[in-house]
Image (spheres, rainbow, N blue to C red):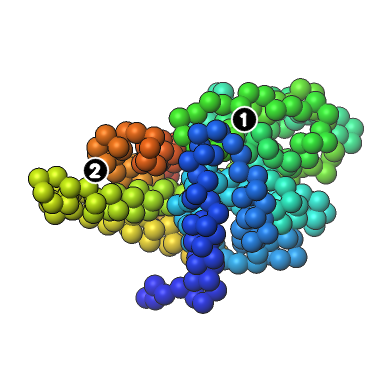
Amino acid sequence: MDFALTVEQQMVKEMAARFAEAEIRPKAAELDATHTHPADIVKQLGELKMLGIAVPEEYGGGGMDYVSYVLALIEISKGCASTGVIMSVNNSLYSFPVYAYGTEDQKEKYLYPCASGEYLGCYGLTEAGAGSDPAGMRTTAVKDGDEWIVNGEKKFITNGNVARYAVIAALTDKEKGYKGISSFVVDLENTPGFKVGRVEEKMGILASGTAELIFEDARLPADALLGKEGEGFKQMLTTLDGGRIGIASQAIGIGRSVLEDAVSYAKTREQFGKPITSFQAIQWKLADMATELDAAELLTLRAAWLEDHKKPYEKEAAMAKMYASDAAMRASVEGVQILGGYGYSKEYPMERHMRDAKICQIYEGTNEIMRLVVAKNLIKG
């Protein structure tokens, strides 16, 4: 068993780390405080091929593997969790399904602009009554001659307020339930009947916009259908498996920042005449953080390796996402505790890490659903 990275993977990791340290981390607090989309940073990520890492070069991407994607996303998320999820969604939830299920024309028209970083994409699945249960979906797409007429509202859509393109799920046959779900790729800027709705006020990842996508008799061309009619649910499951690898990576990046900040603070904070790193209670907290984050990273790299080698990875992606997000949340709670009053103050980034970590346990499949996915795979095996 070889845990060593290839030369290319190591280069990607180091490039992302340098960029995050120089360009992202110094701006993260201000972006969070002002709820500002990091447009300049995103533009640079596109130039570095970070917005389509695993997309082949002929479609505007970096032509790299999913292990490289994990390594890069961890480093970017260390700098700013909001930037991390913007990058994750464009890679995992938008570019992946368009590449995997799109026609050559769709790839040229819809994939290239986002994989190359010219525009951002988003993924419209969640609705007010359909999150963990996609069968509760109410958005419909009805064929009308050479067009599809779409009606419905998508909620909590990351990048929804800034994206040019979207992959959305809609019912094309209400009688079939989840088997009647189809996927569509949409040019949001040129779709009559579409508008961006409410942009959510959130606890964390405040520099990442989370918006409603509203379709009112919105008309899509016939070739907006992604894959075949009725295949949307299967496409969705595979897309979310890859998305969970992205969220696991984001969570690890947050956790790594927590650990670095906690160690740095504990080395200089003195109580009873000595640094608090000399106290066993603090040492144990740091040791637990480091161990759990290393375990989370190994789980995530395993899932990415399986995806790279075209092997099943649904269970492994769910494990990685569940464990990494739980580990990041535990680390951030302890990080606040180590910093004490400063951990609760906006003077230090620790409270931001804690706010950012929480969403990783919720989106792209709650951790309760992740446990069901893991159990299902164990039982059927």
Residue 313 in the image: above or below residue 194:
below
CA gap between label 2 and label 1 equals 35 Å
The single residue placed furthest to the right in the displayed view is 145
Q: Secondary structure at mark 1?
A: strand
Quadrant in the picture for the C terminus: bottom left
Q: Residue at x 54, y 59 (%)?
A: 19
Residue under label 2: 338
Q: Is residue 17 visible?
A: yes
Residue type at mark 1: give it: Ala
Residue 194 in the image: above or below residue 350:
above
Foreground mark, 2 or 1, reads: 2
Residue type at mark 2: give it: Ile
Q: Residues within 10 Å of mark 2 (few under 14, many from 20)?
A: many
Could you say where residue 1 lies in the image, as x and y percent from the top left? 37, 75
Left or right of 283: which side holds 3?
right
Q: Which mark is residue 211?
A: 1
